[in-house]
Amino acid sequence: MQNITVKGLKKSYGSKEVLKGLDFSAEQGEVIAVIGKNGAGKSTFLESLMMIRDFDEGRIELFGKDIRKLNAKAVRELKRDMSTVLQPTNFYKNLKVKELLSLFNAYYGKDADLEGTIRRFELGEHMKSPFDKLSGGWKQRVALAIAFMTSPRLVILDEPTTGLDPYMRDVLWKNIIRHNREHKGTILLSTHYMDEVERYCDKVLLIHEGRAQVFDKPANILAASGHASINDFYLAQIGETEAVPC
Ligand SMILES: Nc1ncnc2c1ncn2[C@@H]1O[C@H](COP(=O)(O)OP(=O)(O)OP(=O)(O)O)[C@@H](O)[C@H]1O
């Protein structure tokens, strides 16, 4: 089943055309990375899917529903099936991790699985730590746990592992993959780490010049392009259309 279908998505900021007709689809159970250089439009694309950024032209269907044709109640219902990582800086700084999780647990009500979340994301050792005193990696781990607390059908993450050391990135990815395997959701995330794309993602979307320049499985991309790594492939793709300044 297709959880996301995007056709001809266009978005400009003033005279700057960022998305020029982007096509995309995502199946249930897939983990998909969105890559592209700084300013390519990754966040714009993800925010359009999250229904927090308006777009100019094209169509977005989530779980088979055209998001432009929904009334307010239907949008609310749809959003219950979706989740994203909140910016850790927005959290109540003085709360302990345990209190923060309980707060979201109460907010989500019967949809939430507090105990399961603590277990899956192995949060036990820091339950009594103030959120504000955690390292960046642990803050992100707690933020991800909250995003997955209700077992949403669609999770959208904007650079979830940026700034984290390789070990913490691996821990977070294992959590993401395990959760998705158990719940068969769709996870869509942007990243600048090409090793993550190759290692953990089912598919990769390369946004370049406002369009989906490539959308395929990492193994297929490597086989078709002959590159040794997704990083080499990415550099070749971006480099081919851009002159290097002298
Ligand atoms: N609200 C806005 N108003 C004007 N321009 C914007 C706005 N949001 C984004 N842009 C511009 O649109 C382009 C795409 O931005 P976007 O954040 O979607 O790219 P990105 O691929 O996520 O970049 P990065 O990898 O640097 O996070 C950029 O040139 C950015 O400056």
Image: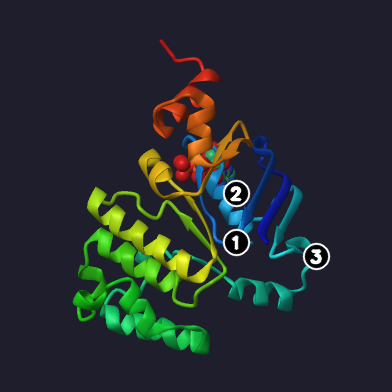
Residue 69's tag is 3
Quadrant into which the C terminus falls: top left
Judge the density around disc 1: few (<14), some (14-19), many (≥20) Cα neighbours within 10 Å: some
* Rendered location of residue 115, percent (x, y): 35, 84
Q: Is residue 95 visible?
A: no
Q: Which of marks 3 and 1 is in front?
A: 1
Residue 45's tag is 2
Taking the image as shown, residue 4 lies to the left or right of residue 31, namely right
Measure the alpha-carbon separation of dots 1 and 2.
Answer: 19 Å
Give amino acid for label 1.
Answer: Gln
Give amino acid for label 2.
Answer: Phe
The quadrant where residue 153 appears? bottom right
Q: Which residue is drawn at 27% across and 59% down?
A: 137
Ligand 1 within 8 Å, label 2 CB: yes
Check disc 1 and report the residue beneath it.
Answer: 28
Judge the density around disc 2: few (<14), some (14-19), many (≥20) Cα neighbours within 10 Å: many
Measure the alpha-carbon separation of dots 3 and 1.
Answer: 22 Å
Residue 160's tag is none
Going from N to C along the chain, the mark reached first, 1 or 2, is: 1
The quadrant where residue 19 appears? top right
Secondary structure type for disc 3: helix
Q: Is residue 127 above or below residue 43?
A: below
Ligand 1 within 8 Å, label 1 CB: no
Going from N to C along the chain, the mark reached first, 3 or 1, is: 1
* Rendered location of residue 225, percent (x, y): 51, 25
Q: Is residue 57 above or below residue 235?
A: below
Quadrant into which the N terminus falls: bottom right
